[in-house]
Amino acid sequence: MAVARKRLADYGLRSERLLWPAKGPGVFEREVEQLEERLMLTTLERAIAWAQTKSMWPDTFGLACCAIEMMSIVSSRYDIARFGMEAFRASPRQADLLIVSGRVVHKMAAPLRQIYDQMLEPKWVIAMGACASSGGMFNNYTTLQGVDKIVPVDIHVPGCPPRPEALMEGIVRLHEKVQAGVPPAYEIRGVAE
Amino acid sequence: MSYAGVPGLVESREAHGETTLVVDPARLVEAAEHLRDELGFNFLSDVSSVDYLGWSDEPVAGSWGDSSGRDLNSPGSWGLARRPAPKPKRFAVNYHLLRLVSGAREAPRVRMQVWVDDAELVPSVVGVWPTADWHEREVFDMMGIRFSGHPNLVRILMDDDWEGHPLRKDYPIGGEPVRFSGEE
């Protein structure tokens, strides 16, 4: 599917997000507000995007050591329930977010793609860690060199494995993308046949 | 322990306190039954295989060296002055055997070895040690060595429609087709 590629800057996002809670609205938030005024987003779309980010349920799909970090974000220390995401669904039909947590071997590509295809739209994908993003150190005949070859990826989280904070940073950035009106990756890049 | 009575014994080697019995592939099952029944090796701990493709051929420059380094200019001339001894055939299949006896303080270990070329058959020892079933499937999957008389010689690790055997020395590195990516 040939889709015109747009960068984030084309949607009006020009700055990095600033994590400075006492500072008030950050540069990013102000830009989002200006963007909304410029694009005249309706209140309904904004409300839908808000609702999507507050109950973005991940799929239970642990692949490798990154899955240990993914599991720990549910624990009380990191507490992903703050974002309404503590409900890891065992069925892809009830999940909105696929966290590819680890290396994907060629034999696992078919189940991964099947799970992605079974998820209902809108759906998002986080490639967690070096292996899911680029194959990592497994540069051999078994391993897929980057999961973005078979599914469109919204957020790449670097690390080997990423700390739970890093994964949550990726999740927060995904929420910001959704609230800013950036469409999911399958609309931007298309899905490989 | 005397291994002189093993049927089809070609050579018996001793290195580092470990014994290797090179066996004629045609009499492999006889030798296995002898080792199990007469000598008490009742446990097959592993079946492994080695690809010696290009062994003892003219080496590429710098592929041999010693503690002073490698000569990158002339083929194999610096360091080791001799090539490794050629192997009888391309593949070696090794059967690692243990004798487990209740109450014994140690388990004697022996390695049974057969040599085959590409497309030669090795008799299956599933009838002797049933655990050889999956071990031989793995050897077939990774090395492409076929076992005659195996009940279900199909791939065990790789995909069913995988082409080639990835641990062979002549298997290409990289460039595997990716499904669902439009590259296939």
Image: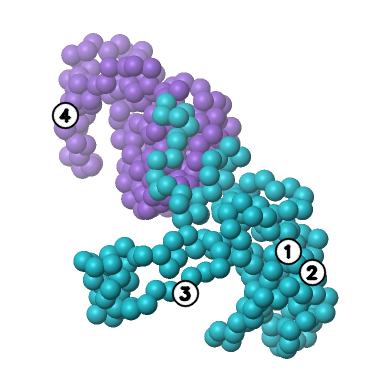
Chain colours: A purple, B cyan
Q: Horizontal placement of A192 versus B109: left or right?
A: left
Q: Horizontal placement of A48 versus A107: left or right?
A: left
**Circle on res. A14:** 4
**Mark 2–mark 3 contact, CB under 8 Å?**
no
Q: Chain of mark 2?
A: B
Residue under disc 1 on the same chain as residue under disc 3: yes
Identify the element where label 4 is drawn.
Answer: loop
Which residue has dot 3 on it?
Answer: B85
Residue under disc 2 on the same chain as residue under disc 4: no
Between B184 and A182, the one nearer to me in the picture: B184
**Mark 1–mark 3 contact, CB under 8 Å?**
no
Q: CA distance from mark 1 to mark 3?
A: 24 Å
- Amino acid of disc 3: Ala
**Mark 3–mark 4 contact, CB under 8 Å?**
no
Q: CA distance from mark 2 to mark 3?
A: 29 Å
Q: CA distance from mark 2 to mark 4?
A: 76 Å
Residue drawn 80% across and 75% down? B34
Q: Is residue A55 visible?
A: no
Residue B162: give x, y in percent of width and height: 55, 40
Residue B72: give x, y in percent of width and height: 23, 67
